[in-house]
Image (spheres, helix red, strand yellow):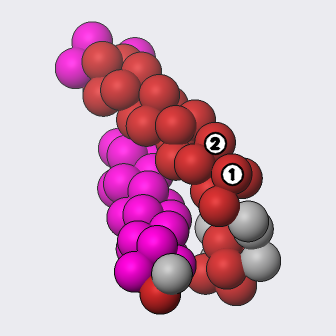
Amino acid sequence: MKIQEIKDMNNEQLKKLIAEKQTQAVKLRFDIAARQVKNHRQYRVLKTDIARALTILNQRIEQK
């Protein structure tokens, strides 16, 4: 996900996105452990997206 797409979201959408991505990350981590997933890079991409969204959300909260 591009950083500009994340910046265009409002706070509620960001919170929803973070929750969805965290759920996906947990499921993917278990699938990797069970060797059901061949592409391990997906987990890294999910973690990066979560970090970006959290950073933008925290910056907005600090500005208020």
Image: 64 above or below 27? below
Q: Nearer the viewer, residue 52 or 27?
A: 52
Q: What stretch of residues is rendered in magenta? A: 33-62
- Residue 16's place in the image compared with 12, above or below, is above
The residue located at (35%, 26%) in the rendering is 26
How would you classify the magenta stretch by its main secondary structure?
helix
Location of mark 1 (residue) = 12
Q: Is residue 38 visible?
A: no
Q: Which residue position holds label 2?
A: 16
Query: In this rendering, would 55 be left or right of 64?
Result: left
- Residue 37 screen position, x and y as percent: 42, 27
Q: Secondary structure at mark 2?
A: helix
Q: Amino acid at mark 2?
A: Lys
- Residue that extends furthest to the left in the rendered view of this protein: 33
- Which image quadrant is residue 25 in? top left
At label 1, which amino acid type do we have? Glu
Residue at the (27%, 12%) spot, across then down: 34
